[in-house]
């Protein structure tokens, strides 16, 4: 991580930062400013004050007594000297020195804080967020915010070095076709009409390509009115990228360079080349389109083994298995809870087999279903899964996608680890399906957005078999979190018309929803493609956090509220009148 020299932060009020003082400063007269972390008095003739700023703590020795308390803001002038023998604090970077002959200037008094400003005490998140201005003083939070700044700087530098230009796009925008629920902003000057806050700069950056910007990027603020969770907030930041006259390979190269630079700046080590995997392979091997590849436990296909089985539980189009090494010792209650979990995920059930030692040597299976298996199925299950004595085999039989997805969740439940725990394993997932399911009218639904270019090898099946068509879209995954997604965009009118037709969007609706973009495309749209990297998620992983709230200065709670400001709040009747709005009381 980049460290700013103490001299660069000297001001007329302070000469040094608290955490910057070392043995080489002994003998210097310095002035430091900060918050009182702790005060200790030794009789009437000596007081010790631990002074804290964002860089650390320095012990100040003050003759006599001093009338300061925890979190008072003070300036201290003193002489740097070695700590007396036997009092060195090895836990502090400044632990070999202290300030002596100190004079203290009170800059501001403070009420007692609602919780201790250190990282040794766990505090309820609601209290932390209500007093976020105090919470952010804690070393962990200071470190997270400064890490975020380092990551942003590395991303910007990487894009600048690759010839991209930073362009800011509007926050007041027209409704977009990306599928997420948007925040609506009523217009005072045009009553009855609204702007929306952008869920991404997608259409704006495509217009920039038409405008000849060629290579655009932005640290963009985006907003989506969706349910909150550990990796999602209403507001989020992303590295937004778009480039002209490029292929998918070019975009993957641009973004890889940026995120690897960010990893190196944040951790001091540069990960190796980012591997890639098709969407179909990710689903088949890991049961997820954002697989955590830090550990194995890959899914195993048992469908050929049970193709003609008489076991009713395995009479399904797909039979998939998962091996938990040394898992045979799981209790029956734990196995029952795994079965319940599988059912909640949509499976009809979960079969399990403990692998034990056979009576006559070899291996045996301990399971309620074992007596229904043929000898060939029993030996095939062992040989195909590679399970050995002490292992547990879990099996789901169902439709292919469901069987994979259920086992994918169980894989994470049983073998997963915190997302912020190393190593950092990036993965490109490519060749996503063009469509995902159908709407109520029977039309395919875009898996990404309707401007995603179909895979050139699948264009001839666009109308006849849309479910089989791949798109030129791609996701970047890190430790099981989706960092972002992107695609090659449709720039040709004939292909765009075909995609709209498959989606059931007629010419009138297309003009109504996307007219300004389609109109711009008539004036010469270059081939272009782009991507967006979620900065909150990226920083959270580097910081070792499992929630992006810990790397955002002022986040919302799970319910979408802000305990510090009280938002959201009702607005005054006069404001509503100016906007031509009335509030409908909520139903009981």
Image (cartoon, helix red, strand yellow):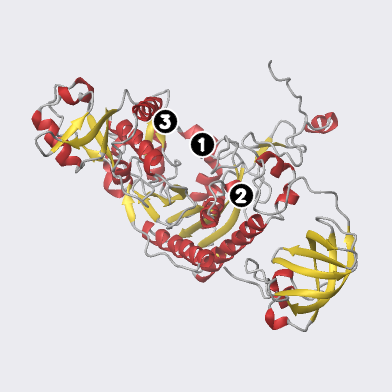
Residue 547 shows which numbered tag?
A: none
Between label 3 and label 2, give the one nearer the viewer: 2
Furthest-top residue in this view? 588
* Sequence-first disc among 3 and 2: 3
In space, the residues marked 3 and 2 are separated at their CA atoms by 43 Å
Q: Nearer the viewer, residue 34 or 398?
A: 34
- Residue in view at x 77 percent, y 84 percent: 27
| SS category of the residue bearing label 2 | helix
* Sequence-first disc among 2 and 1: 1
Up-down relation of residue 58 to residue 457 (above or below): below
Up-down relation of residue 364 to residue 325 (above or below): above
Using the rendered image of the protein, determine whether residue 496 is visible from the camera's viewpoint: yes
Res 90 → quadrant = bottom right
- Residue in view at x 84 percent, y 57 percent: 72
* Sequence-first disc among 3 and 1: 1
In space, the residues marked 2 and 1 are separated at their CA atoms by 27 Å
Residue 290 on image: x %, y % = 40, 45
- Find disc 1 in the rendering and name its residue: 179
Q: Is disc 3 surrounded by few (<14), some (14 to 19) or many (20+) residues within 10 Å? A: some
Residue 550 shows which numbered tag?
A: 2
Is 321 left or right of 336, judged from the image as shown?
left
| SS category of the residue bearing label 3 | loop
Residue 501 on image: x %, y % = 39, 34
Marks 3 and 1 close (CB-CB < 8 Å): no
Q: Nearer the viewer, residue 168 or 188?
A: 168
Between label 2 and label 1, give the one nearer the viewer: 2
- Find disc 3 in the rendering and name its residue: 504
Up-down relation of residue 175 to residue 349 (above or below): below
Q: Nearer the viewer, residue 51 or 554?
A: 51
Q: Nearer the viewer, residue 496 or 392?
A: 392
């Amino acid at each position: 991580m980049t460290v700013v020299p103490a001299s660069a932060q000297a001001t007329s009020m302070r000469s040094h930062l608290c955490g910057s003082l070392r043995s080489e400063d002994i003998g210097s007269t310095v002035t430091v400013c900060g918050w009182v972390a702790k005060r200790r008095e030794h009789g009437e003739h000596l007081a010790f004050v631990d002074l804290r700023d964002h860089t650390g703590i320095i012990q100040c020795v003050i003759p006599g007594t001093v009338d300061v308390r925890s979190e008072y803001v003070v300036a201290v002038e003193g002489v740097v000297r070695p700590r007396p023998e036997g009092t060195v604090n090895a836990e502090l970077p400044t632990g070999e020195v202290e300030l002596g002959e100190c004079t203290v200037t009170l800059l501001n008094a403070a009420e007692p804080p609602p919780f201790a400003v250190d990282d040794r005490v766990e505090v309820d998140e609601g209290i932390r967020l209500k007093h976020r201005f105090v919470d952010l003083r804690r070393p962990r939070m200071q470190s997270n915010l400064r890490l975020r700044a380092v990551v942003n700087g590395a991303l910007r530098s990487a894009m600048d070095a690759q010839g991209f230009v930073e362009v800011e796009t509007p926050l007041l925008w027209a409704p977009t076709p990306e599928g997420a629920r948007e925040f609506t902003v009523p217009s005072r000057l045009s009553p009855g009409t609204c702007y929306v806050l952008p869920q991404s700069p997608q259409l704006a950056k495509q217009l920039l390509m038409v405008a000849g910007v060629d290579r655009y990027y932005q640290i963009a603020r985006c907003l989506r009115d969706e349910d909150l969770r550990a990796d999602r907030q209403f507001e989020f930041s992303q590295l937004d990228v778009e480039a002209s006259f490029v292929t998918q390979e070019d975009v993957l190269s641009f973004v890889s360079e940026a995120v690897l630079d960010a990893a190196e700046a944040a951790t001091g080590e540069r990960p190796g080349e980012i591997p890639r995997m098709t969407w179909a392979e990710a689903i088949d091997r890991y049961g997820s389109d954002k697989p955590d590849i830090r550990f194995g436990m890959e899914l195993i296909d048992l469908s050929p083994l049970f193709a003609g089985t008489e076991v009713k539980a395995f009479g399904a189009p797909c039979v998939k298995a998962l091996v938990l090494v040394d898992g045979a010792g799981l209790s029956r209650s734990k196995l029952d809870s795994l079965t319940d979990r599988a059912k909640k995920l949509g499976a009809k059930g979960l079969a399990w087999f403990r692998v034990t030692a056979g009576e006559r040597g070899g291996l045996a299976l301990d399971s309620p279903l074992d007596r229904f298996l043929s000898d060939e199925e029993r030996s095939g299950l062992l040989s195909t899964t590679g399970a050995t004595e002490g292992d547990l085999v879990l099996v789901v039989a169902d439709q292919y996608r469901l069987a994979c997805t259920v086992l994918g969740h169980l894989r994470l439940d049983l073998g997963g680890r915190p997302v912020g725990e190393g190593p950092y394993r990036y993965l490109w997932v490519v060749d996503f399906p063009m469509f995902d399911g159908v709407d109520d009218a029977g039309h395919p639904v875009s898996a990404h957005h309707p401007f995603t270019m179909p895979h050139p090898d699948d264009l001839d099946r666009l109308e006849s078999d849309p479910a089989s068509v791949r798109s030129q879209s791609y996701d970047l995954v890190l430790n099981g979190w989706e960092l972002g997604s992107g695609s090659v965009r449709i720039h040709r009118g004939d292909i765009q018309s075909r995609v709209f037709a498959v989606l059931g969007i007629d010419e009138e609706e297309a003009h109504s929803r996307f007219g300004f973009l389609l109109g711009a495309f008539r004036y010469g749209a270059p081939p272009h493609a782009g991507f967006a990297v979620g900065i909150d998620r990226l920083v959270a992983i580097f910081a070792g956090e499992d929630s992006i709230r810990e790397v955002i200065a002022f986040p919302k709670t799970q319910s979408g509220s802000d305990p510090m400001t009280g938002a959201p709040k009702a607005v005054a009747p006069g404001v509503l009148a100016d906007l031509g709005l009335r509030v409908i009381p909520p139903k009981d």
